[in-house]
Amino acid sequence: MKQLKVALFDLDGVVFDTEPQYTIFWGKQCREFHPEHPGLELEIKGQTLTQIYDRWFSGDLEYARDIITKRLDAYEATMDYVYVEGFETFIAELRSYGVKTAVVTSSNKAKMESVYQHRPEFKQLFDAILTSEDFSESKPSPDCYLRGAARFGAAPSECIVFEDSFNGLRSGRAAGMFVVGLVTTNPKESIAELSDCQIADYTNFNYKQLNELWQVI
């Protein structure tokens, strides 16, 4: 049998059920700066801040970047960082089987400081935490997940990615890794082609099930 060595987790929508809060935040910004484009906050789900700014806040709206960044920093400092249901039990089980765990997120170090303040135990759940400062290219580039694998000296075929956004799922796919899609952000049918299996949360998912699925790929 193959040995599963590394589990790589995106953050928002995968570790924390924060996507509804971000939808509220971006809904306010989009209504203020792009009233002509209702529902824009849904279109930008899963995109990095740089991608959002480059596409929607350039030219005449470039001035809004500093405004939004300050608002976002303040918002993230007071967010509720609630774990996706069953996550803590699931990751503890992975580690009990010797699987290394890492967060691979497009969030920056400043955001992570807010996470650590609200969740002091967070760092103890993972063997490594990689943020946007650790990558040269953003998702959907595979760079972040390849670097995550390299952190543990593992081959892509020995790693599993947990993702929820389209860009994140494409990143895991491009890295040549087994991809578990969380349906916390997008419906199951929309992410099925980009993931090897889909789960709503971790309550009915365990190491044995994961390993069986991974072994046949």
Image (cartoon, rainbow, N blue to C red):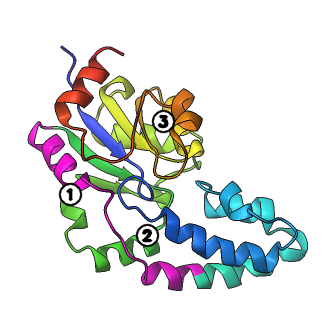
Which span of residues is magenta-colored?
A: 72-98
Q: Is residue 174 visible?
A: no
User: Is 72 displayed left or right of 3 in the figure?
Assistant: right
Of the numbered discs 3 and 1, the one sitting upstream in the chain is 1
Q: Looking at the image, is 21 positioned above or below residue 43?
A: below
What's the distance in space between the residues labelled 3 and 2, CA to CA?
A: 22 Å
Q: Looking at the image, is 66 positioned above or below residue 182?
A: below
Picture coordinates of residue 164 (x, y %)?
A: 48, 46
Regarding mark 3 in the picture, which secondary structure is present there? helix
Query: What residue would you read off at disc 1?
Result: 125
Tell me which amino acid carries mark 3. Gly
Regarding mark 2 in the picture, which secondary structure is present there? helix
Q: Quadrant of the N terminus?
A: top left
Query: What residue would you read off at disc 3?
Result: 172
Q: Is residue 114 magenta?
A: no
Tell me which amino acid carries mark 2. Lys
Of the numbered discs 2 and 1, the one sitting upstream in the chain is 2
User: Is 178 displayed left or right of 214 in the figure?
Assistant: right
The structure residue drawn at horizontal position 31% and vertical position 62%, both measured from the top left corner, is 83
Q: Is residue 172 visible?
A: yes
Q: Nearer the viewer, mark 2 or mark 1?
A: 1
Regarding mark 1 in the picture, which secondary structure is present there? helix
Residue placed most toward the observer, 5 or 25:
25
- In the rendered structure, find residue 109 and report the number of the disc placed on it: 2
Near mark 3 (Cα within 10 A), the count class, few <14, some 14-19 or many ≥20, is many
Furthest toward the left, the residue is 96
- In the rendered structure, find residue 139 and report the number of the disc placed on it: none
